[in-house]
Amino acid sequence: MSSILDHWLRIGDLTAKLPVVQGGMGVGISLSMLSSAVANEGGVGIIATPNIGMYEPDFETNYLEANIRALRSEIRKARELTKGILGVNIMVALTIFEDLVKTAIEEKIDIIFSGAGPPLNLPKFLLENSKTKLVPIVSSARAAATITRWWMEKYNYPPDAVVVEGPKAGGHLGFKPENINDPSFVLEKLVLEVIEALKTYKTKDGRPIPVIAAGGIYTGADILKFLQLGVAGVQMATRFVTTYECDASDKFKQTYIDSRKEDLRIVKSPVGMPGRALLNKFLDDVERGEKKPFECLFHCLKTCDYKNAPYCISQALANAKEGKMEDALVFAGSNAYRATKIISVHELVEALKEEYGIASGGEEL
C-alpha cells in the first residue's frame, strides 16, 4: 500500500506535501479563500485573475488599476491565511496579461501558471532575485517543447514545471471540437508525450522538468493512475468547487450538485475556443440563437469577437460567481455531475487520501 503523501510535488525550491495543484477558476471562483485552504492542506492553491477586480468600485471606469489593486489584495489576503504555496493563473489571452504578471511578481507570488495561448515572453518579467516560479499550461507535446525551447534560447530559463491540460477539463479547452472525444487526445496519452518531449531539458537545479496532469482528474484513484504514468503531480479544479471555502456563491455550487452527466455540453465561446459548461436556461437561449445584448466596456480578452458575440462571456461568468444563474455561463469539468454535497477542503483532501489508499491496495492511514 502507498500513501498520496509519499509523492511530494517539487517545483524548484518549493515542496508541496500533497501533489495537488488546485486549478485556477475564473471569474472569481478561486480567490484567496479557496487557494489558502488548499495551501493549508499541503497542496498548491491558485488565485484566478480574469476580471479579479469585478468588485472594485472603479472596475468599469478604471479597469486596469481596479484589477491590479484587487490582485494585490487577494494575494495579501491569502498570505494572511496560509504559510503554504500560493500561485496565480494568468491567461495569455487577457488584454492586461503583462500588467498582472508584473503585479504578481512584485507581490512575490510563489508560482505563475499561464495558458490560453503560449506564454512565450513570461520569463522577461522576472525581477533580479525573483523567486517566483513560471509554469506554462499546454495541451500538446509540441507546445511544451516549443515554449521550453523558446525560453531557453531567449532567456536561458527552463520552465519550473509544465501543466498538461487534457480535453476533459472545464472551461475553455485548447483543442479543436472534433478532437475533444478523440482517443488520440486522451490525457493519459498527452502526458506521456509531453514527458518524452521534455526529456532532453532540465530545470535550473538539474532535475527533470516536472509534468503536472490536468483535466478530468477527480478522485484519489485518478491521482494514483497519473502518478504511476510518471507525472510529478496533478491539477484539480472541478472537485474543489463544492467546498465551503470555494469563493463562488452557494447557488453556483448547487448547480454542480444538481447536474446530470447529460447536462455537460461543449459550447462555442465568444473567445473562439470550445468550452465545457453545464446546460441551463442561459445556454438554452444562446443555442436557440437568442442574443444577450451587451456593451463591451473593456475588451478583457484579446481573442473575443465582442462585436458579433451573442453574449458577454465576462459578464456571464461573473453572474455565475454571484449566483445569478438565469444569466450565467457555468463552466465545469467532465466530472461535475459526480458532486453530491458541499464539504470542507480538509474533508475533500482526506477523501482523496482515502481513495488513493484504497486504489493502491490498502486503506489510507
Image (cartoon, rainbow, N blue to C red):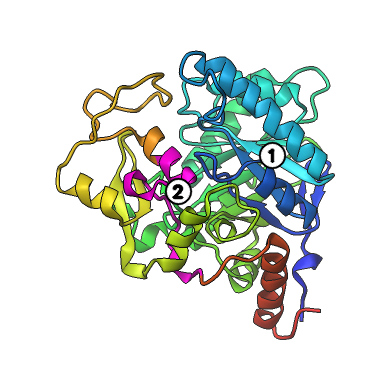
Q: Amino acid at mark 1?
A: Gly
> Residue at the spot x=49%, y=61% of the render?
216
Q: Nearer the viewer, residue 356 or 2?
A: 356
**Labelled disc at residue 323:** 2
- Give left or right: position of 3 versus 222: right
Name the residue that disc number 1 marks: 87
Picture quadrant of residue 156: top right
| Residue, far left | 289
Q: Residue at x 74, y 84 (%)?
A: 363
Classify the position of the N terminus by image quarter.
bottom right
Q: Which residue occupies 74% across, 68% down?
A: 4
Residue 144: percent from the left, percent from the top? Answer: 54, 40
Q: Position of residue 125 (x, y in %)?
A: 66, 19
Task: Give neighbour class at mark 1: few <14, some 14-19, many 20+ (Cα, 10 Å).
Answer: many
Name the residue type under label 2.
Gly
Q: Is residue 336 magenta?
A: yes
In the rendered image, residue 262, in percent from the top left (x then y), is placed at 31, 68
Q: Quadrant of the C terminus?
A: bottom right
| 54 lies left or right of 326 | right
**Residue 193 shows which numbered tag?**
none
Q: What's the magenta region?
A: 317-339
Q: Is residue 242 above or below residue 55?
A: below
Q: CA distance from mark 1 to mark 2?
A: 26 Å
- For the residue pair 106 and 244, the one nearer the viewer reads as 244
Residue 202 visible at all: no
Q: Quadrant of residue 79?
A: top right
